[in-house]
């Protein structure tokens, strides 16, 4: 009887260790996923910010150059603004077919890595 009681206590101890280990493993996996998502988001935001700054300076340079070509600095800026508006309209028009599926795939790929 004493042997059975000791085996039951031993089994209970091993079971609690097993549950504790699975709990810690789950926490580690969640932490790893969260860290991966946050680091990817930070890298994406940094890249986007650098892209926007680069686009700004390219637009300014193009506007200045076009302004010299058409002998009107304001005209150059209006031409570049029109180019950006056309690009924006195209992106808005294709957002449901191209932009959203691309973003959705990228996010899901990161989640399941």
Image (cartoon, grey):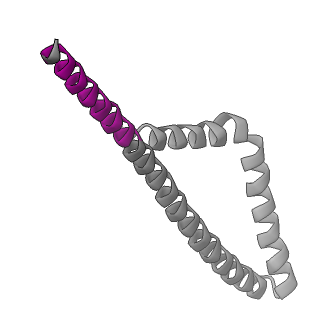
Span of residues in magenta: 3-26
Our reading of the magenta stretch's main secondary structure is helix
- Residue 95 lies, with reference to residue 40, above or below; the image says above
Residue 26 x/y as whole percent: 40, 38
**Observer-nearest of 35 and 100:** 35
Can the viewer see residue 72 in this picture? no
Residue 63 x/y as whole percent: 74, 80
Residue 111 x/y as whole percent: 48, 40
Q: Is 109 placed left or right of 1 in the picture? A: right
**Observer-nearest of 69 and 77:** 77
Q: Specify the quadrant that holds the N terminus.
A: top left
Residue at the outermost left position: 3
Residue at 28% across, 31% down: 18
- Residue 45 lies, with reference to residue 55, above or below; the image says above
Q: Is residue 109 magenta?
A: no
**Observer-nearest of 38 and 105:** 38
Q: For residue 55, which quarter of the picture?
A: bottom right
Q: Is 81 placed left or right of 43 in the picture? A: right
Residue at 45% across, 55% down: 35
Q: Specify the quadrant that holds the C terminus.
A: top left
Can the viewer see residue 80 in this picture? yes
Residue at the outermost front position: 2
Residue 13 x/y as whole percent: 26, 30
Residue at the outermost top position: 1
Residue at 73% across, 56% down: 87
Q: Is residue 10 magenta?
A: yes
């Amino acid at each position: 009887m004493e042997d059975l009681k000791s085996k039951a206590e031993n089994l209970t101890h091993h079971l609690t260790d097993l549950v504790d280990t699975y709990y810690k493993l789950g926490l580690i996996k969640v932490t790893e996923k969260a860290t991966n998502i946050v680091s990817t988001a930070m890298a994406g935001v940094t890249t986007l910010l650098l892209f926007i700054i680069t686009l700004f300076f390219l637009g300014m340079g193009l506007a200045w150059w076009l302004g010299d070509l058409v002998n009107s600095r304001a005209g150059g800026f209006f031409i570049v603004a029109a180019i950006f508006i056309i690009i924006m309209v195209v992106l808005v028009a294709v957002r449901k077919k191209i932009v959203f599926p691309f973003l959705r795939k990228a996010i899901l790929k990161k989640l399941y890595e």
